[in-house]
Image (tube, rainbow, N blue to C red):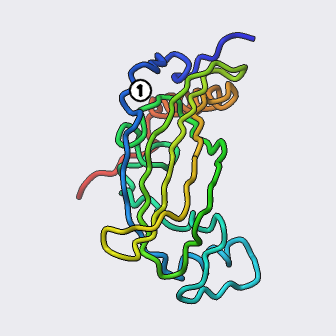
Amino acid sequence: MPPSTSPSATTAIDAAAWQAWLGRSETVTDTLHPGPLAGLSATIDTALFQPLPGQPVPPLWHWAYFLAQAPAHSLGRDGHPQRGGFLPPVPLPRRMWAGSRFVFEQPLRVGDVVQRTSTIESITHKQGRSGHLVFVTVRHVYRICTQPNLPVHALTEWHDIVYREEPPAVVQAAEAVAQADTAASNVAPPFALNAP
């Protein structure tokens, strides 16, 4: 099989440069309002969940919070905020959730003000049958802000992200579309509008 000719395959994978991102952290705060939980319940078509103040948030439903509020012009091709800020600028185009691990210590509750501190723990480059792979592990620590300056540790999550190359079929299809667009731009329009 010939090597991929995708732009990602020809981009230098400089894993050493990304080591500067190790240990980088950011902290955000969110209030666990009932609306996102009711919306998630409807989305996954469970029995209608009516979250009440103080009610425990079901395990993993904390994912309904801490959503990035990035303006559309700053999003990458994959719909996520462009890389190079908190996450390293990995040039591979496909970002995927590779897995998570959890330690639950205290329940999060509806109405809690929660602080999440995210830290980049590891960045690993591998070569697989499908091409280059870059794994980034982010540790998220969730603390309930019950009293000022005395947050209560509730949950630790390790989030594994994998960046991959485009499969050859996708690259070929994108190249065909680009060629068709180029050919179409060289055709004279059938009519021209003249200003009055």
Q: Is residue 34 above or below residue 92?
A: below
Please indicate whether residue 191 sits to the left or right of residue 39 in the image.
Answer: left
Which image quadrant: the C terminus? Answer: bottom left
All told, the count of numbered labels is 1
The spot of residue 42 in percent (x, y) is: 68, 78
The spot of residue 131 in percent (x, y) is: 65, 21
Residue occupying the point 41% across, 26% down: 19
Q: Amino acid at mark 1?
A: Trp
Which element carries disc 1, helix, strand or loop?
helix
Q: Is residue 182 above or below residue 114?
A: above
The spot of residue 190 in percent (x, y) is: 46, 43
Identify the image quadrant of residue 41.
bottom right
The spot of residue 15 in percent (x, y) is: 46, 21
Please indicate whether residue 24 sits to the left or right of residue 186 in the image.
Answer: left
Q: Residues within 10 Å of mark 1 (few under 14, many from 20)?
A: some
Which image quadrant: the N terminus? Answer: top right
Which residue matches tag 1? 18
Residue occupying the point 25% across, 55% down: 195
